[in-house]
Amino acid sequence: MPWAAGLIVAHVRDRVTPSTLDFFMTTAVEPRTNSPTTRRRALIASLIGSSIEWFDFFLYGTAAALVFNKLFFPSSDPVVALLLSYLSFSLTFFIRPFGGFFFAHIGDRIGRKKTLVMTLALMGGATVAIGLLPTYQQIGVAAPILLVLLRIIQGLGIGGEWGGALLLAYEYAPRTRKGLFGSVPQVGVTVGMLLATLFLSLMAKLPEAEFLAWGWRVPFVASIVLVILGLWIRRGIDETPAFLKAKETGNIAKQPLVETVRHHWRESLIACGLKVVETAPFYIFSTFVVSYATNQLQYTKVDVLNAVSLAALVACVMIPVMGWLSDIIGRRRTYTAGVLLMAAFIVPYFKLLDTHSVTLLTLATVLAMGVIWAPITATLGTLCSEIFHTRVRYTGITLGYQIGAALAGGTAPLIATWLIAKYNGNWMPIAIYILILAAISLVAVLSVRNRIANVAAADLEIT
């Protein structure tokens, strides 16, 4: 695999130049001042673009629990069909690092802005195509193959998106508000999930036959409108001040991935460790719970989707609040508090679900994802950004983030479904799994302080 990554990097360096992308990705005026107006524009572009990308991404995750196991992965055993559906969901997380390497190289070489336009277009095209796919009954085994191929394309796009959206906000932020600015792209995760869940919840009100026939396709195809909006907004922003300064001084890494792996592998491991407790619980609370609560506990899918939607709405408010708080009391303290609360609440979470009360299901989901998860995800991006220099920051944070997501993100619903089946509906092994990840992330956050101190002062004072 290293030789393949090297070929990709070499090809991008030789073929993708600023002139190749200028027609689509530049504006007539490129302001270089980091004024409050410019910062607001960058923050809005980061939030909206991130929200659209994650909307596309989570449409698949929710549909995997409700639709794809029936239309694309049919099986006489419902558990097997669901596992295959989740496997297609999880596969993307192992593709995301490759998309991250590819686009992070572009982002550290020719700019954050151009990269973000490319990732959004790639993601949007794949999402619309999924909405137009024929089913297994119509074209046989070609249906799941095409679905998986399109999901892989989604993975490549989202792999490069997160780092760019984060740096667009972080590198424009005033020094005293980096926590708040760095939390805004994370709001895009919950906004995207909220939109995806609400849209599918609305379509799920259709009779089952109509929902399976065409209702689930509507949000996939309609997403093209959001993609066009996002491309238009991102086209109107400038490169970040940090990247412009690095470009003017010639402080651009020629081989960002090689330099990161060779000189910043410890920081990448820390970023990976920080990610695992943020990503696995999120997919347990937002994706796995949909199938678990409906199939095992006999909740209606509308009640579960409504609970997830409310939790996402609360998280949209809590994430920037936690980002703001991290600027006051510190990123490490805010993050650590979230991890400890997560570890303490995972058992009560499942106990509340076991009551078969819609009210307590909603309460458990809101507390878990809307409140406890918020300080972890709000500070994750800023913590990761602060341990890498500008010249390899895009590559460094993407490497750690996407590997952590591959190890503990997309696999979480798959692992949880397997554990529930293996232990006859007992959720305790899932709780133990989350506790282990919490311990890993606590070790990672304890290693952050010295790494931040080693980042050049110029990187922190550009704005």
Image (tube, rainbow, N blue to C red):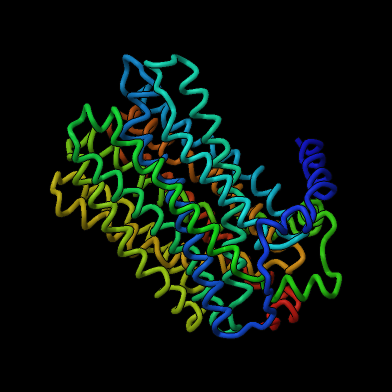
The quarter of the displayed image where residue 382 is located: bottom right
The quarter of the displayed image where residue 238 is located: bottom right
Q: What residue sits 61% from the left and 57% below the top?
A: 116
Q: Nearer the viewer, residue 298 or 462?
A: 462
- Direction from residue 300 to residue 246 in the image, left or right: right
Q: What residue sits 40% from the left and 27% below the top?
A: 83
Q: Nearer the viewer, residue 14 or 258?
A: 14
Quadrant for the C terminus in the image: bottom right
Q: How many marks?
A: 0
Q: Position of residue 165 (x, y in %)?
A: 57, 62
Q: Nearer the viewer, residue 215 or 327?
A: 215
Q: What residue sits 35% from the left and 53% below the top?
A: 195
The quarter of the displayed image where residue 301 is located: top left
Q: Nearer the viewer, residue 439 or 384?
A: 384
Q: What residue sits 25% from the left and 45% below the top?
A: 201
- Direction from residue 177 to residue 187 in the image, left or right: left
Quadrant for the N terminus in the image: top right
Q: Position of residue 437 (x, y in %)?
A: 49, 50
Q: Position of residue 188 (x, y in %)?
A: 45, 60
When the figure is inspected, residue 423 is found, relative to residue 140, above or below; the finding is: below
Q: Position of residue 200 (x, y in %)?
A: 30, 43
When the figure is inspected, residue 292 is found, relative to residue 112, above or below; the finding is: above
When the figure is inspected, residue 91 is found, relative to residue 260, above or below; the finding is: above
